[in-house]
Amino acid sequence: MMQQTALKYDVQVLENGRIEFSVPFPAGAHLTVFILPADDTFQDLLLASVGLCQSRAGTAPINSSARRTAAA
């Protein structure tokens, strides 16, 4: 699998729930976009990515619900 770089943009929601921002990709490029509130810590995504990497390496994935409970 090819390594990809994630881009993070802090944007404000406009009227009718729209957001606008410029990206460094050519017109017509297909992108996957994740939308999270600005106060989100990305903890769930981080735990999911670590679990995925561990499962591919043959080790047990992290139990994210147990981790969240322990950290709270």
Image (cartoon, rainbow, N blue to C red):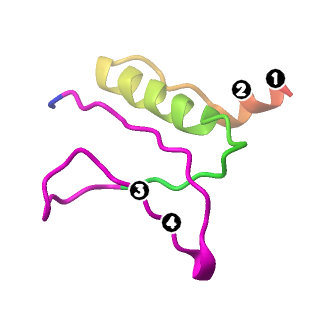
Q: Main secondary structure of the magenta part?
A: loop
Q: Residue at x 81, y 23 (%)?
A: 70
- Magenta stretch in the rendered image: 3-32
State the CA–CA distance, disc 3 to disc 4.
Answer: 7 Å
Q: Residue at x 68, y 42 (%)?
A: 40
Q: Position of residue 18 (x, y in %)?
A: 52, 73
Q: Residue at x 40, y 20 (%)?
A: 54
Asked if the residue under mark 1 is in contact with the one under mark 3, i.e. CB atoms within 8 Å, the reply is no
Quarter holding residue 44: top right
Marked residue nearer the N-terminal end (4 or 1): 4
Asked if the residue under mark 4 is in contact with the one under mark 3, i.e. CB atoms within 8 Å, the reply is yes
Amino acid type for the residue under numbered disc 2: Arg
Q: Farthest right residue? A: 72
Which residue lies under the disc numbered 2? 67
Q: Residues within 10 Å of mark 1 (few under 14, many from 20)?
A: few
Horizontal arrangement in the rendering, residue 61 relative to residue 25 (left or right): right
Which of the pair 36/64 is nearer the observer? 36
Asked if the residue under mark 2 is in contact with the one under mark 1, i.e. CB atoms within 8 Å, the reply is yes
Q: Which mark is residue 70?
A: 1
Horizontal arrangement in the rendering, residue 70 relative to residue 64 (left or right): right
Question: Under tag 4, what secondary structure?
Answer: loop
* Nearer the camera: disc 3 or disc 1: 3
Q: Residue at x 24, y 44 (%)?
A: 24
State the CA–CA distance, disc 1 to disc 2.
Answer: 5 Å
